[in-house]
Image (tube, rainbow, N blue to C red):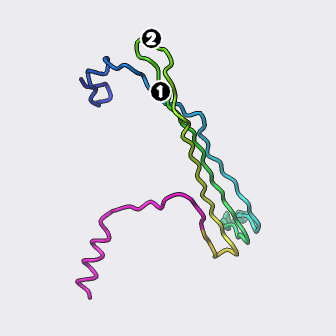
Amino acid sequence: MVTSSGGARDCRSQLAELRVKAFASVLAVDQGQSFLGAPSFTVPIIGFGVPDIPLFKDIEHSGHAELKLSVADEKSGEFVGESVPAIGTTRHDDYTLLIIIHFTRTDLEKRQWDLGTDEIAAVHDDASG
């Protein structure tokens, strides 16, 4: 059987004994900023924009999530149980000092993209070296 979204659905799903529901009791993203310096502005008449000049700038991002699963009997709808909440938090802060010094503190994993460019660079280095 194929669903309206194009995905395959197992016909045996009507034989399920339990129904599992996922609940997100907490989903939050927060952002804060501290700034000391000259803010960006537009020069009158000319319309030329001057960027901000930070002596100190801190942009803070944090995320929070709490998920749990609830299980009920498929036929009677009677509550069977629920999982322990899975709790996740993350933090990502960007700092700028004296206009040019920039660094980041984060507990996020660094995302790595494989575009095949490393192999191309290796071939190019071998050919030129």
Looking at the picture, which amino acid does disc 2 mark? Ser
Task: Give the structural element (helix, strand or loop) at label 2.
Answer: loop
Q: What is the magenta range?
A: 104-129
Q: Is residue 21 above or below residue 40?
A: above
Q: Is residue 117 above or below residue 111?
A: below
Q: Position of residue 39 (x, y in %)?
A: 73, 64
Q: Are marks 1 and 2 in contact (CB under 8 Å)?
A: no
Q: Nearer the viewer, residue 41 or 129?
A: 129
Classify residue 17 by image quadrant: top left
The residue tagged 2 is 76
Nearest to N terminus: mark 1 or mark 2: 1
Name which residue lies at 54% across and 36% down: 67
Q: Nearer the viewer, residue 11 or 19?
A: 19
- Circle 2 residues within 10 Å: few <14, some 14–19, many ≥20: few
The answer to whether residue 84 is magenta is no
Name which residue lies at 61% across and 55% down: 91
The residue tagged 1 is 21
The answer to whether residue 123 is magenta is yes
The number of discs equals: 2
Looking at the picture, which amino acid does disc 1 mark? Lys
